[in-house]
Amino acid sequence: MSKGRFGKYGGQYVSEILMQALIELEEAFEKIYPTQEFQREFTELLRDYGGRPTPLYHAKNFSKVVGFKVYLKREDLLCGGSHKLNNTLGQALLAKKMGKKRLITETAAGQHGLATVMAGNICGLETEIFMGVKDIQRQASNVKKMKLLGAKIRPIKTGSGVLKDAVSETLREWASCSRTTHYLMGSAVGPHPFPTIVATFQSAIGQEIKQQILEKEDRLPDAIIACGSGGSNAIGAFKPFIDNAEVRLYFVEGGGEDLNAENSAAAFQLGRPGVLHGSLMQVLQDEHGQIRPSKTRAAGLNYPGRGPEISHLCEIGRVKPCYAFDNEVFEAVKIMCRTEGLIPALETAHAIAYVLNHPEEFSSDEIVVINFSGRGDKDIETILRHFYGA
């Protein structure tokens, strides 16, 4: 597999202006990441600031509901409330060692933006967050947290005012200021080397799952289920298991109201390969090749592309692409709340919903790990409106 490519997917489809920044980033990552100094500092940050390792929790009550043993990888317990901090601490530390003074990034659900300003503050870097105006409205609590932590929020009104548009604007900004600024990409998307960098930092999730499940069960799980659009939490959970063919891997997208609805984000069902934000990947697009927006209830699943590595793994059959519909997702939130006392993020609830609605795919003697990628504080108003009209 050539550098920056996963089968036919990946690459660097960018302007010449950005190529130098990407080359600099790749060289810095390859030089700095393997050093003992970086590994020590990164590990200490993940442990002492982030709270790693996160627990692998046997959800006994939920397991009784579905009829097989389910473990939850508790990324919701990572500082900030989601898996996002794994990547932001790594990239912020890298940017600091590259001599950068400022971080810019995009966010939708707000968890990545929050994690970026947290990491930026730790590393002494200014932070500016690009966020679609629609996402600013529906993720108000995270916007308030980011502002409190000192981030500058740049509202994006172009296009549909969602994540896709925020990514486009962040790339434009980076092209003008890459000498002093690092674009802290939030998911395993974008031009090489971003997908590799993000997957590397997020693979802490899967490495811990493997160690913890062997300690608890003395064997690997039969299946790992993770939600995703760009796919950072999924590839992080999957990557250490890719060569373990006996472990089934499920990638759950946002199905929206149904597959025919305009808010469906099921790119593996409805899309096809195309270039988006500098990378060839599976993309939601219309018959003319124009990007098709989605408006699922989970802001973090509205990116229209799937990371190149996830795209490749689904194409070769190593990962099964799946989806969950909105009504299933809200029911999954309720069941997880009532059985385990945990409120999942709406994104996370897609993975839970798939397990609940497809019991035929798992036998009673199997062990299943759900990557519990984030907590639901940010979605509480949406959840309450759905159930109670509050």
Image: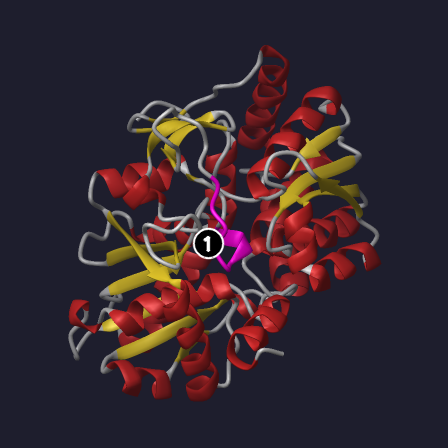
Relative vertical location of residue 169 with respect to residue 389 in this rendering, above or below: above
Q: Is 101 displayed left or right of 227 in the figure?
A: right
Q: Is residue 335 magenta?
A: no
Q: Main secondary structure of the magenta part?
A: loop
Residue at 23 percent across and 83 percent down: it is: 67
Badge 1 marks a residue whose secondary structure is: helix
Q: Is 264 displayed left or right of 381 in the figure?
A: left
**Res 41 visible:** no
Residue at 52 percent across and 28 percent down: it is: 277
State the residue position of label 1: 233
Residue 169, position in %: x, y? 66, 31
- Give the residues in magenta: 293-301
Q: Quadrant of residue 254?
A: bottom left
Residue 328, position in %: x, y? 37, 70
Q: Identify the colour scheme used.
A: secondary structure
**Res 99 visible:** yes
Q: Is residue 295 magenta?
A: yes
The N terminus is located in which quarter? top left
